[in-house]
Image: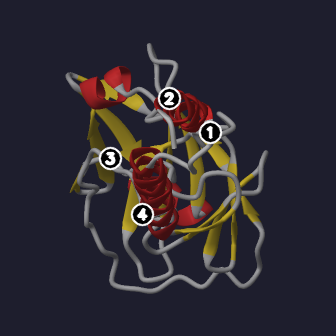
Amino acid sequence: MKKSEAKNKFEEDKFRYKGPNKLIIASTFFVILAVIGVFYVKSSNSNQIVSRYEGGDYRLNETFEYENSPISMTNIKSEIVGDKIKISLEKIKKNKLVYIEVEGSENALTAFITNAGRLVVAVAMCEPCRSKRFRIEEYNLVCETCGTRWNLNDLTGLSGGCPQYAPENLPYEVKGNYVYVDKNVVYEWRPRI
């Protein structure tokens, strides 16, 4: 083979397709692997509750069965006493699921007794659809607008748009026949999504 033929062959080989670059293949593989990993982690935690507060743990000495459901929200009034919001425990027990507007705040509260007898006080908002109204159906709390369902006892998401964003439990204390919630927590509360 002469020099000119070798040079021509070299020039031809320089532009000939030799297959994919190994670096590109390896990079693509790791990107796909990362996407699959993120999807797996997100899907495995999809019903996990996102919470910023430790809710109260007041328990009544009785269990509640909601067989005659659905039970709609009943509006009740609250009272501002110093830096606390005061809510009647008797009205919560009587009505089972209540909606409480808070004077001076756009945020409202909901309160109910779980099947196990625990008092829950939470922000009255289904964050995905921004509804403030719920109902109880047997063992579930259900958004009136989008139908998202949460287990009544622990607010674990069961189905719907964003089950991990249940009405957010708020800390409270019970004194006598009244429930007290920190006013600033309610006034400063913002949606998680």
Q: Give the amino acid at mark 3.
A: Leu
Amino acid type for the residue under numbered disc 1: Arg
Nearest to the observer: residue 30 or residue 61: 30
Image vertical order of residue 76 relative to residue 160, above or below: above
Mark 4, mark 1: which one is toward the viewer? Answer: 1
The residue singled out by tag 3 in the image is 170
Q: Nearer the viewer, mark 3 or mark 1?
A: 1
Tag 1 residue = 16
Image point 44% across, 13% down: which residue? 104
How far apart are labels 4 and 2 at the CA level?
A: 55 Å
Q: Residue furthest top?
A: 104
**Foreground tag (3 vs 4):** 4
Mark closest to the chain's N terminus, 2 or 3: 2
Dot 2: what SS? helix
User: Distance between the Cα atoms at labels 3 and 1?
Assistant: 68 Å
Which residue lies at the image location 46% right of the left edge and 19% below the top edge? Answer: 103
List the residue tagged with mark 4.
41
Q: Nearer the viewer, mark 1 or mark 2?
A: 2
Q: Earlier in the sequence, mark 4 or mark 1?
A: 1
Which amino acid type is marked by label 4?
Answer: Val
Q: Secondary structure at mark 4?
A: helix
Q: Secondary structure at mark 3?
A: loop
Q: Distance from label 4 to label 1 (Cα)?
A: 43 Å
Residue, disc 2? 7
Mark with earlier residue (4, 2): 2
Which residue appears farthest toward the front when viewing the image?
A: 2
Q: Earlier in the sequence, mark 3 or mark 1?
A: 1
Residue 80 percent location from the top left of the image: 33, 25
Give the crowd class for mark 3: few <14, some 14-19, many >=20 residues within 10 Å: many
On screen, 182 above or below 122? above
Q: Nearer the viewer, mark 4 or mark 2?
A: 2
User: Looking at the image, is mark 1 or mark 2 earlier in the sequence?
Assistant: 2
